[in-house]
Image (cartoon, rainbow, N blue to C red):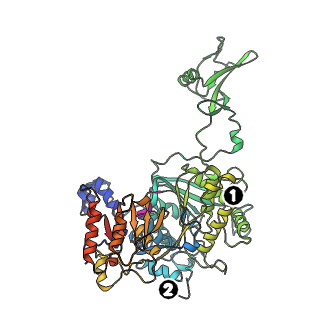
Amino acid sequence: MSDGAWKIQELASEGLTDRAAELGQLFPEAVTDGKVDIEKLKLLLGEAVEESPERYGLTWPGKRDAIRLAQKQSTATLKPMLAESAEFDTTKNVIIEGDNLEVLKLLQKSYYGEVKVIYIDPPYNTGNDFVYKDDFAQPMVEYLRVSGQTDEDGRQTSVNTETSGRFHSHWLNMMYPRLAAARSLLHEQGLIFISIDEVEISRLRLVCDEVFGEENHVADFVWHNKRGGGNDAKHVAVEHEYVVAYARDKVRLAHLFVPYDPAYLTRYREKDSVGRFFWDTFKRKSGKQYYPIICPDGTVLEFDERGNPLSWLRSEARFLQDQKEGEVRFVRYGDRWSVQFKQRLPEGKKPRTVFLEESILGSQGTTSDGSTAMLDLFGSNIFDNPKPVPLLKHLLSFQGDQDSIILDFFAGSGTTADAVMNLNAEDSGNRRFILVQLPEKTDNPEYPRISDITRERVRRAGKKIKGKAGNKAANLDVGFRAFKLAESNFRNWDSDTDTFLSEELDFYVDNINSGASDDDVVHEILLKAGVPLNVDLQKIQIAGEAVYVAMGGLFIASAARKISQELIDGLLALEPWPVQVVLLDAGFGDNDSLKLNARHQFASRRPESDPDKDNALRTV
């Protein structure tokens, strides 16, 4: 085994012990050598543990396997698709082609706790939907077959019909591991929105209660998605769908607001040092705040002309405080006094649980409007039932952070990206999107896979948005880095074993798969080291070898197959001094002295107090 070689699976799995570490902080007695002792944990929890065989909860055939699948580490990687990208070098947006479960697992280390909003529009399980058919034992093998990468016949659509015997179970087995993986990516103040119809909303609520916690349910929004209902309905014309919302941690969730309609803001004509307001009457027709108010001329306002006690908006103590702070005024109309207060513009308007296109979503809030938008971009309807951009803009506006990551792992036609770019154009925000879409086959020869439609829609929408942005266009990010799910560039490493990859190098002169480019290898190293996919990446030449500089020079990687002393010297001369340098172990060949000396040289650049100084140079 090569001395000091880095385990490629260690590189990929360092983030998998996070939950065990969190448990260890709460119950240190229950964690030994990084492993959780379940029986000891039960003893520590005492009466909080449910021991009865009869328990409340959702169960279905295959649930245990679905849970295991959610925890199984991916052996795949993400390869850059430079030709399919738009403004690859400068954009902060990402579109990934591949099975979303495998992709979500690969994103864990780079985006754990970083995503502010997730929106998904999963298959509704209508009986004709394509349902992702997961292979619990070999998920990557199944994906390669499904996506046509290993089978000339391409993907066979898995249709979940009601006669299949496990109609709801198949859908739950598909959803559970994806929701579990998505939860880890959510920021502590993050939100997930899930579009669904009446077929599976009850089960979706139950599975989300289990994954996110019942206490983190925010709302079930009702979206009026059709005009006039449907004549094809057997009993009742259904004119709505749902958007189910959960928080990562509802206690930490910031207040949710939606933007004010411009017409609403016209009421708040006045402005002072505090903000906008209008003068409103302090008297109320009903209430229980009864007390006398003395006017400037000594008139006492306590009863109306009928002798009934006057009711005021606020308590007497609050009124006196407002009066002291200039928040109230007295206005005389003839021989009568009116007490008025400054009605301040609230921080925001609370979202409503019913989405009516007339009141909230304007005139473009239905499914047919989503189709119209696609028709406008492509000149034909090339995607069935796309969600409308206003719906997504409305949902994304609830979370007011303009500098955030938005994830959609059932990307479809790419509406989420369109909405993100539109919002940024409107408020100069810096939202970034990550889209994931399976390369499901279509009947369109121009766009043979749905992922092709996703990317092209974002290109066209971005161009259109930028064309309308005027002076803001220069600062708008409407590009994206395209990646695709693929087998690892490193040969046959097994994430479920504890063997060093370097032990396998006894069987290989080079541990890199043939055909893997430097770009492919370096991006896999970056991904599995936890570097975001949209990191600023500079490619330079040192001693005739390509060197990739990431994170402002803090992370350096090279896929050089023949490492020379000149390359090592060039890396040592870099400024600023990199915190981490990663090279291919096979690049040193049989020159162990070069590798050992390089390790010592890089380690010497770190402080003696640094416990990881010996790993300043790591090899894979």
Name the residue: 29% across, 73% down.
Answer: 5
Residue at the farthest top position: 298
Estimate the x, y position of residue 426 in percent, counting from the top left. Answer: 65, 51
Residue depth check, mark 1 versus mark 2: number of the one nearer the observer: 2
Name the residue: 43% across, 84% down.
Answer: 514
Estimate the x, y position of residue 147 in percent, counting from the top left. Answer: 53, 80
Name the residue that disc number 2 marks: 150
Instruction: Name the mark on residue 365.
Output: 1
Please give left or right for residue 412 compared with residue 510 in the image: right
Name the residue: 49% across, 68% down.
Answer: 175
- Magenta residues? 109-115
Judging from the image, what secondary structure is the residue with disc 1 in? Answer: loop
| Quarter of the image where one finds residue 305 | top right
Foreground: 194 or 561?
Answer: 561
Position above or below: 28 against 106? above
Residue at the farthest right position: 334
- Quadrant containing the C terminus in the rendered view: bottom left
| Quarter of the image where one finds residue 230 | bottom right
Of the image marks 1 and 2, the number of the one nearer the N terminus:
2
Mark 1 and mark 2: span between their CA atoms? 41 Å
Position above or below: 71 against 333? below
Q: Residues within 10 Å of mark 2 (few under 14, many from 20)?
A: some
